[in-house]
Amino acid sequence: MIDRLPPLTALRAFEVAARHMSFAKAAKELHVTPAALSFQIKSLEDHLGQPVFLRLNRAVELTEAGRALQPGVQDGFEALKAAWRIARRVTQADTLTVTAGPAFTARWLAPRMFRFAQEHPEIELRFSASLNIADFTRDEIDVAIRFGGGDDSGLYSRTLIEEWITPMMSPALAAKMLSPADLKNSVLLHQDVVPFLDRTINWTTWFAAADIGAPPDGGLRFTYADHAHDAAIAGSGVVLGRYSLAERALRDGQLVAPFDLAIQLPYRYRFLCPQGQETRPHIAAFESWIMAEVADMEDFRQNHDFVDLEALE
């Protein structure tokens, strides 16, 4: 038997009809008449030598042959659509789409983007700020910046920032802080550092590391880390600041980190893209630029004594 495939249009008609289990709905999706769709299905059945649908009064059902054919045909068209999206991305060399978390996008990426635009006016940069894990093919994403421990198998992955935390506050509040123990008489701003990962880090963690007992009750609680940082900048209290989100405010003098003790977290930001795509010119240009930006952050680490989170557990 010669494994000659039926026409692609016939396979497409079958895939859509099998997905909807309705010739009428399939015809509507494909923008053809029901008669034209039925003709394509009949063409496929003639090619196969047996029916793939049972035609009932007001419904259709897959035959045994249809049930055997449907999964492979559906997967095949999904693979074709994925390949088409990839091919389109490759040809759009003037556009770069980056996804990152909302707080990181607002606090770290957005304030720096003018420098990338100045260096690469030929590249149109697009952001997708979301905590959802984007699919590179389905969502037409070129680069993802993700935070966490990271299972990056099958992807090109490069560490950007090793995250750490320490108390941060406005300069006016910092002037009143003589030692970590003074935090017991301060308004603490609460926002669990990584509640969506495998552990939660909060003020109790830092107080234990500083060996100053338990944190005081009360304070202000925030759902999002960047909102807690905003409150600290405004002088509303002391935030257990994440360096990645506070670096610019520290550099500009809006926040101060007066204590030496800092906790090194087992989480990091990574630069990710599909394996092999890192050599594409606009992705390589963005990686080179962002690594240079990250290198400028290292000077703040020199002012702190780091304790690994694992040592506290």
Image: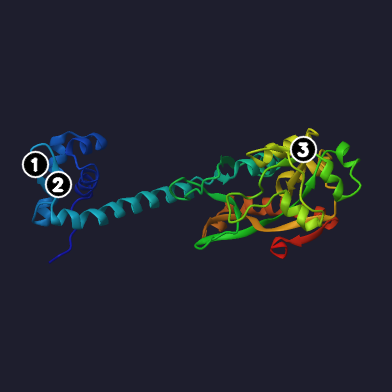
Residue 181 in the image, given as x and y percentages of width and height: 86, 49
In this rendering, would 270 be left or right of 31?
right
Question: How many numbered tags mark residues here?
Answer: 3
Marks 1/2 in contact by CB < 8 Å: the verdict is: yes
The residue lying furthest to the bottom in this view is 1
In this rendering, would 95 be left or right of 9?
right
Please identify, in this view, whether the residue under mark 3 or under mark 1 is nearer the observer. Answer: 3
Task: Label 3: state its secondary structure.
Answer: helix
Q: Is residue 62 above or below residue 68?
A: above
Q: Is residue 19 above or below residue 148?
A: above
Tell me the distance, in whole angstroms, between the alpha carbons under discs 3 and 2: 63 Å
What mark, if any, has residue 232 been given in the picture? 3
Q: Given the image, on which type of amino acid does mark 2 rest?
A: Glu
Observer-nearest of 107 and 295: 107
| Type of colouring | rainbow
Number of other residues with Cα within 10 Å of mark 2, as a class: few under 14, some 14 to 19, many 20 or more:
some
Please identify, in this view, whether the residue under mark 3 or under mark 2 is nearer the observer. Answer: 3
Marks 3/1 in contact by CB < 8 Å: the verdict is: no
What mark, if any, has residue 56 been given in the picture? 1
Q: Earlier in the sequence, mark 3 or mark 2?
A: 2
Number of other residues with Cα within 10 Å of mark 1, as a class: few under 14, some 14 to 19, many 20 or more:
few
Instruction: Quickly name the residue at label 2.
Output: 61
Q: Is residue 36 above or below residue 18?
A: above
Residue drawn at x 12%, y 67% as measured from the top left: 1
Q: Earlier in the sequence, mark 3 or mark 1?
A: 1
- Res. 149 visible in picture: yes
